[in-house]
Image (tube, rainbow, N blue to C red):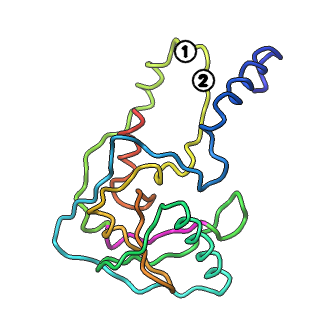
Amino acid sequence: MGNLNAQQEFEINTLIDKYKSSFAKDKYDIGTVRDYEAHIDLLTDKYCSKRPYRCSMEDKKEIEEQVAKLLQKNLIEESYSPFAAPVTLAFKKEDNKRNRLCIDFRDLNKIVTPQAQPFPLIEDLVIKTRNFKYFSTLDINSAFWSIPLRIEDRKKNSFCYTRRPLSMDVSTLRLENLSRNISKNLY
């Protein structure tokens, strides 16, 4: 807001305060897309399952903490499914440590039916907004988790770590086609 005058900055802050419930308080404070559920259609009737990856005690503790938060927020549930993808932690720049929980869906992605959903062209967006007076950028907090997953497909979204099998009740970042679901809901 560096290029706003004092009155404009006051108006923006008043607006933000008025709608503060629309802003996430933490990474697990996630809204839900209404009237749409993501689905996972398969090319074959096969399932894919892998054993959990080995990890250090420090990583195991981090995974368990994140899983507990996901359970608490009803983003995952216990699942006894023939599908099971292993999890690992990836390095997260902002925190300068390995704490991004990643589910390895590479095997599942090989049997997911691809969806055609073109992403908008930047040029089209520029033309569409050429007469706009103000622009802002917003980051949708954990956007993939805001899209519910069709109940019958949740078993396909299962993952495992050393304690128990679980499944995501929502879309996940590394699953084929789900970035198209975000695009479909935004544009």
Q: Please report the residue visible at 36 percent of the width from the left and 46 percent of the height from the top.
A: 181
Q: Please report the residue visible at 65 percent of the width from the left and 80 percent of the height from the top.
A: 61
Q: Do the residues labelled 2 and 1 touch (CB within 8 Å)?
A: yes
Tell me the distance, in whole angstroms, between the alpha carbons under discs 2 and 1. 7 Å
Q: What residue type is labelled 1?
A: Phe
Q: Please report the residue visible at 32 percent of the width from the left and 66 percent of the height from the top.
A: 109
Image position of 150 (left or right of 140): left
Quickly name the residue at label 2: 135
- Queried whether the magenta region covers residue 104, the answer comes back as yes
Q: What element carries label 1?
A: loop
Q: Please report the residue visible at 39 percent of the width from the left and 41 percent of the height from the top.
A: 34
Q: Is mark 2 on a helix, strand or loop?
A: loop
- Number of numbered markers: 2
Q: Give the range drawn in magenta.
A: 100-108
Could you tell me residue 13's position as x and y percent?
Answer: 74, 26
Is residue 112 depicted above or below 8 in this figure? Answer: below
Q: In which quarter of the image is residue 127?
A: top left
Image position of 71 (left or right of 168): right
Q: In which quarter of the image is residue 83?
A: bottom left
**What quarter of the picture does the N terminus occupy?**
top right
Q: Which amino acid does label 2 sit on?
A: Phe
Image position of 48 (left or right of 160): left
Quickly name the residue at label 1: 132
